[in-house]
C-alpha cells in the first residue's frame, strides 16, 4: 500500500540556523504534497504544500522541494526561531481518496 | 465559523466498553476523515468519507465504525474498546478531496484501561 517515510524523527538546531526534513513516498500516482505543523496540544495545521507540476515552492522562511523521479520531497526552514519548535508532518495524496502522513519530526530550536 | 469541532476532549474507558467520538464541521466540506496519533507512528488514517452517505476504510480501520448521514457530522464509534485503542484521535475535513488543505479538530484523548 501507499507509504510515506519521514526523517529524522527528532531534530535540534541552533536558533538562526536552517532545518531540513525529508520524506519519501511510494505511490507514483501521488500529486499533492503538503506539510503540517503541530503545536503542543493542538491539531496539525497546514504550513505549505506543493503539487507535482512544480519543483519548488517558497513562502518567506519556509520552502519545499520535490523530486518526482526519486519520489522524495523536503521541507526547508531558514533562520529558525523559537516559535518554529513543533512537530512537523509531511503527507502525500493522489487526490483520489486518501492522504497518507509521515511519522513526524519533532523540531527543537536551541536558544 | 467554528471550523472542526470534536467532543469529548478527554475520555477514559474500560476494556469492552463502547463509545462514540463526535466530529462536526460548519464549512460545508465534503471530505472528512479520522486519524489516530500514536508516539512515533504519526497520523494514521482510520476511516474517511467523500460525502454524505459514503464512507471507506483507511490504514487502520479494525475496531472502528463510521457513518456519514449529514455533510456536517462524521462520528467515530468504538465497538468494544481495547487498550490498543488508547490514542489521540483527530478529525479533519477539506472542501472536496484529500488533495486540499485539511482542517483538523483539536483532538480527543482516549485512555482505555
Image: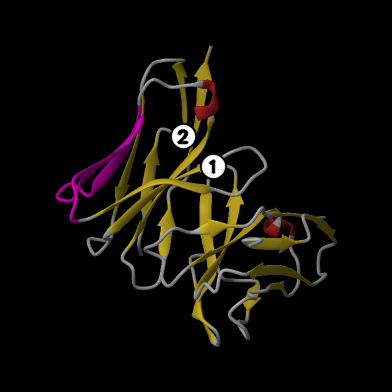
Residue B62: % across, % down? 59, 71
Chain hosting mark 1: B
Question: Is residue B40 placed above or below B93 in the rendered structure?
Answer: above
Of all residues, the one furthest to the left in this rendering is A69
Residue at 31 percent of width and 65 percent of height = A94
Q: Nearer the viewer, residue A102 or A16?
A: A16
Chain hosting mark 2: A
> Is B54 situated left or right of A70 in this image?
right
* Cβ atoms at labels 1 and 2 below 8 Å apart: yes
Question: Is residue B53 placed above or below B36 in the rendered structure?
Answer: below
Residue position marked by numbered label 1 in the rendering:
B40
Q: Nearer the viewer, residue B2 or B17?
A: B2
Q: CA distance from mark 1 to mark 2?
A: 8 Å
Residue B2: % across, % down? 66, 61
Residue at 62 percent of width and 82 percent of height = B67
How packed is label 1: few (under 14 Cα within 10 Å), some, or many (20 or more)? Answer: few
**Residue B35: quarter of image:** bottom right
Residue A81: % across, % down? 48, 21
Residue at 67 percent of width and 42 percent of height = A41
Q: Is residue B36 magenta?
A: no
Residue range in magenta is A53-77
**Image quarter of the N terminus of chain A:** bottom left
Disc assigned to residue A9: 2
Question: Is residue A16 placed above or below A100 in the rendered structure?
Answer: above
**Residue A61: quarter of image:** top left
> Is A58 situated left or right of B81 in this image?
left
State the SS at label 2.
loop
Amino acid at each position: 500500500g501507499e507509504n510515506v517515510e519521514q526523517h529524522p524523527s527528532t531534530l535540534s538546531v541552533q536558533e538562526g540556523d536552517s532545518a531540513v526534513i525529508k520524506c519519501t513516498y511510494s505511490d507514483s500516482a501521488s500529486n499533492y504534497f503538503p506539510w503540517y505543523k503541530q503545536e503542543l496540544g493542538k491539531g496539525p495545521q497546514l504550513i505549505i504544500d506543493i503539487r507535482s507540476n512544480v519543483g519548488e515552492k517558497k513562502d518567506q522562511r519556509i520552502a519545499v522541494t520535490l523530486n518526482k523521479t526519486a519520489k522524495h520531497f523536503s521541507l526547508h526552514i531558514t533562520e529558525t526561531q523559537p516559535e518554529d519548535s513543533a512537530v512537523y508532518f509531511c503527507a502525500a495524496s493522489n487526490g483520489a481518496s486518501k492522504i497518507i502522513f509521515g511519522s513526524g519530526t519533532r523540531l527543537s530550536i536551541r536558544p | 465559523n467554528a471550523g472542526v469541532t470534536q467532543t469529548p476532549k478527554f475520555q477514559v474507558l474500560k476494556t469492552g466498553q463502547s463509545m462514540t467520538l463526535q466530529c462536526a464541521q460548519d464549512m460545508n466540506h465534503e471530505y472528512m476523515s479520522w486519524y489516530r496519533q500514536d508516539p512515533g507512528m504519526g497520523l494514521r488514517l482510520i476511516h474517511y468519507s467523500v460525502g454524505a452517505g459514503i464512507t471507506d476504510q483507511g490504514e487502520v480501520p479494525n475496531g472502528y465504525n463510521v457513518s456519514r448521514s449529514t455533510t456536517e457530522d462524521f462520528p467515530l464509534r468504538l465497538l468494544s474498546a481495547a487498550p490498543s485503542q488508547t490514542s489521540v484521535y483527530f478529525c479533519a475535513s477539506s472542501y472536496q478531496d484529500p488533495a486540499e488543505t485539511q482542517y483538523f479538530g483539536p483532538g480527543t484523548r482516549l485512555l482505555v484501561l
